[in-house]
Image (spheres, helix red, strand yellow):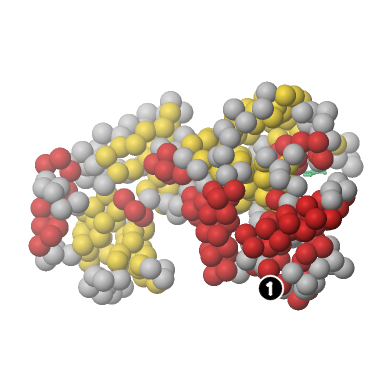
């Protein structure tokens, strides 16, 4: 285990004598070389947790170990950590070269070593041509790359990034996160990045750590978290589901019990299919599907999102752009493959129990 957090909490004192539990009892182990996304809504304690790992904030309770050594009392500089902040925090009056060299200068490394290391990082981050520019002469994406090179200069063994793409527009952001992912792989450095964007977490991370109100709710690979969410909070935070109290009258889901009355059912668009009666490919599914009426159609770039009313409930599903056009008000068939059910007794994935009766070969 490279990094280990044991029972980490942080309680802040408020000006009015109140207390805020920013982080509560977090236990977490991270292996060497892992790329971790720390995900959670605003105020869930992500930055506070990252700052405690970096040594910029002192935990109220708990211990932090790096390679089995307790580091609670080590200064940030002694933890061998590189930190990239949300707003890059580049030194405005230093060139790109000087920004990257800064940490090495502070350590009083030799001129020649510094030059070699900085040139190597400039090459790695594709900034060699821009080395004499000042931060205000760079685009957001370029500034972010400088921040990244600067964080790597002192050869840290752990890289922490707090919303590294927050200030970057959508298009560049996607490119930059691919670039960063490959770069982290190439360098092989253990990394934790904070984000409140689930798509970003899924796209980049080996493993996601999900926080809610300072507590760790679930950790797992993006796929595990997506397919087996531990709580209704996780299920609704990942993706864009519709959440219902019951599914009364839906074919294939008659067996769901709701004795307590606090069951929640999460329906993801990916597990719902809308088709027309005359589509031969779906002929077998007619008996296991419901009648619906298209209420809204939204263009999502790579697909259409249909909002379809079934039994008085509006469901959402995706439709490939290749398929026949759809009109608002049109009748369609709706098939629900599977749902996530959360009740006080636990989480369950329930499949449509009629599906085994039909031909599933094409799926
Ligand atoms: N220095 C501080 N003093 C008092 N309360 C604080 C302090 N820093 C953070 N908090 C509180 O701790 C909680 C967690 O804050 P934190 O910044 O860690 O959240 P976050 O998950 O990073 O949120 P965001 O996504 O908005 O950046 C919040 O309720 C915040 O108001
Ligand atoms: Mg934050």
Between 159 and 171, the one lying in front of the other is 159
Q: Can residue 347 be seen in the rendering of this structure? A: yes
Residue drawn at x 85%, y 40% is 14
According to the image, label 1 marks what residue?
129
Task: Please state, as top left, top right, bottom left or bottom right, where the N terminus lies in the image.
Answer: top right
Residue drawn at x 87%, y 68% is 93
Residue 202: x percent and y percent?
Answer: 49, 50
Residue 35: x percent and y percent?
Answer: 56, 43
Structural crowding at the residue carrying mark 1, measured as other residues with C-alpha within 10 Å and reported as few (<14), some (14–19) or many (≥20): few
Relative placement, left or right, of 7 versus 114 is left
Residue 217: x percent and y percent?
Answer: 56, 35
- Classify 95 as above or below 227: below
For ligand 1, give the image quadrant: top right
CB at disc 1 and ligand 2 closer than 8 Å? no
Relative placement, left or right, of 326 versus 104 is left
Q: Can residue 39 be seen in the rendering of this structure? A: no
Per the image, label 1 sits on a secondary structure element best described as helix
Between 309 and 108, the one lying in front of the other is 108
Between 203 and 178, the one lying in front of the other is 178
Relative placement, left or right, of 239 versus 195 is left
Residue drawn at x 45%, y 52% is 239
- Classify 98 as above or below 37: below
Q: Kindly indicate the quadrant of the structure image that contains residue 192.
A: top right
Residue extending furthest toward the front = 112
């Amino acid at each position: 285990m490279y990094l280990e957090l044991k029972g980490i909490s942080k309680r802040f004192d408020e000006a009015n004598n109140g207390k805020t539990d920013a982080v509560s009892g977090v236990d977490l182990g991270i292996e060497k070389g892992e790329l971790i996304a720390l995900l959670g809504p605003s105020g869930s304690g992500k930055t506070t947790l990252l700052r405690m790992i970096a040594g910029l904030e002192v935990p109220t309770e708990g211990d932090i170990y790096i390679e089995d050594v307790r580091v609670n009392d080590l200064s940030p500089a002694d933890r061998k950590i590189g930190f990239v902040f949300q707003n890059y925090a580049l030194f405005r009056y230093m060139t790109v070269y000087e920004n990257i060299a800064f940490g090495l200068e502070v350590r009083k490394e030799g001129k020649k070593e510094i030059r070699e290391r900085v040139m190597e990082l400039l090459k790695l981050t594709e900034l060699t041509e821009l080395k004499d520019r000042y931060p205000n002469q760079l685009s957001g994406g370029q500034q972010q790359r400088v921040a990244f090179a600067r964080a790597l200069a002192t050869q840290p063994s752990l890289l922490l990034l707090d919303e590294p793409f927050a200030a970057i527009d959508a298009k560049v952001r996607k490119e930059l996160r691919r670039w960063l992912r490959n770069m982290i792989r190439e360098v092989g450095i253990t990394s934790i990045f904070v984000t409140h964007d689930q798509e970003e977490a899924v796209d980049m991370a080996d493993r996601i750590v999900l926080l809610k109100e300072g507590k760790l709710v679930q950790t797992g690979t993006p796929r595990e978290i997506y397919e087996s969410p531990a709580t209704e909070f996780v299920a609704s935070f990942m993706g864009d589901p519709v959440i219902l109290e019951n599914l009364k009258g839906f074919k294939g889901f008659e067996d769901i019990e709701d004795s307590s009355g606090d069951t929640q059912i999460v329906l993801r668009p990916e597990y719902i299919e809308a088709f027309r009666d005359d589509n031969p490919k779906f002929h077998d599914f007619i008996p296991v599907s419901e009648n619906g009426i298209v209420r809204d159609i939204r263009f999502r770039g790579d697909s259409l999102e249909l909002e379809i009313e079934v039994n008085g409930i509006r469901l959402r599903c995706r439709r490939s752009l290749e398929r026949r056009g759809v009109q608002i008000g049109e009748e369609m068939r709706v098939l629900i493959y599977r749902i996530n059910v959360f009740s006080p007794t636990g989480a369950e994935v329930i499949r449509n129990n009629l599906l085994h009766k039909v031909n599933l070969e094409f799926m």
